[in-house]
């Protein structure tokens, strides 16, 4: 059996002295696996994935990403961040830069790529997310769905081994959600390890190898999509699904 690319061992995190946001998280993610994390608001989903690239710091337990244990070692954190791409709820694009400039910035500054090579890579990723014709526009000239696709292309420009998605469609109008999910579905077939926090249960059914259900900072259930949606084992997950699938 190959070594997991992400391992949580008894990971705990608090905000301040009182809010225990992650409680004894044990989780392994295999290379190339596609994980969807779901659960009610405030359950710790986003905090969980933000720990993977050290945007959030855990206080107890072990977290190992692609063989590197995440602690306070700045070099280790930098090493992990070069392997992990992230797409947020908000697009976080620089409004004063064109789409192409947004994509070439990190490869040139972080990856030390020459401008020509960074531009070629950026155009390739824009083609991949089907908006190559928007390269010279500014973010505010694009729709929300297009901006999120730019954000995905930007993350892909650093050739990550792992992609994290933190509710990537929550800031979009309903008609724009499908275009972003379609891009992520295409990516899912290309071998990148994916961990996605989302309420889009149709997407989870179509893409996930495993669904993780969280509540109150704990993983209460994890299973393949068919069993999770059709035969949930935990009473709390059954209640959650009855509400979210009933709309």
Image (cartoon, grey):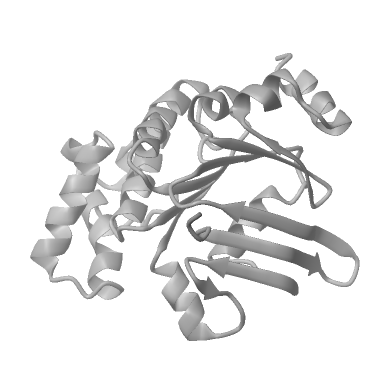
Considering every residue shown, the one lying at the far front of the view is: 1
214 sits left or right of 4 in the view: right
Q: Nearer the viewer, residue 147 or 192?
A: 192
Q: Nearer the viewer, residue 119 or 128?
A: 128
Work out whether 73 lies above or below 209: below
Give the percent coordinates (x, y) of residue 123: 16, 48
Residue 136 in view: no
Q: Give the number of marks.
A: 0
Question: What's the residue at 80%, 60% (across, down)?
Answer: 24
Considering every residue shown, the one lying at the far left of the view is: 116
Question: What's the residue at 28%, 37% (across, down)?
Answer: 129
Question: What's the residue at 70%, 14% (across, down)?
Answer: 247
Give the percent coordinates (x, y) of residue 241: 75, 24
Residue 88 in view: yes
Q: Nearer the viewer, residue 227 or 37?
A: 227
Give the percent coordinates (x, y) of residue 142: 32, 37
Work out whether 23 lies above or below 185: below
150 sits left or right of 24 in the view: left
């Amino acid at each position: 059996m190959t070594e997991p690319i992400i391992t949580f061992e008894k990971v705990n995190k608090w905000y301040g002295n009182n809010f225990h946001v992650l409680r004894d998280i044990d989780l392994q993610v295999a290379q190339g696996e596609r994980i969807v994390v779901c659960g009610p608001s405030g359950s710790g989903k986003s905090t969980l994935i933000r720990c993977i690239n050290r945007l959030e710091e855990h206080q107890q337990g072990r977290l190992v990403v692609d063989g590197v244990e995440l602690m306070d070692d700045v070099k280790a954190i930098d090493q992990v961040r070069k392997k992990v791409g992230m797409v947020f709820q908000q697009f976080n694009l620089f409004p004063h830069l064109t789409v192409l400039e947004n994509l070439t910035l990190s490869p040139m500054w972080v990856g030390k790529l020459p401008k020509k090579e960074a531009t070629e890579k950026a155009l390739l990723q824009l083609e991949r997310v089907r908006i190559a014709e928007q390269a010279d526009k500014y973010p505010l000239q694009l729709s929300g769905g297009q901006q999120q696709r730019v954000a995905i292309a930007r993350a892909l420009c650093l050739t990550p081994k792992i992609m994290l998605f933190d509710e990537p469609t929550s800031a979009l109008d309903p008609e724009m959600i499908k275009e972003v999910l379609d891009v992520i579905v295409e990516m899912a077939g290309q071998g990148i390890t994916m961990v996605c926090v989302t309420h889009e249960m149709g997407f989870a059914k179509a893409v996930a190898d495993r669904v993780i259900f969280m509540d109150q900072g704990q993983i209460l259930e994890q299973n393949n999509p068919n069993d999770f949606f059709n035969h949930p084992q935990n009473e709390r997950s059954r209640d959650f699904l009855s509400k979210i699938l009933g709309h």
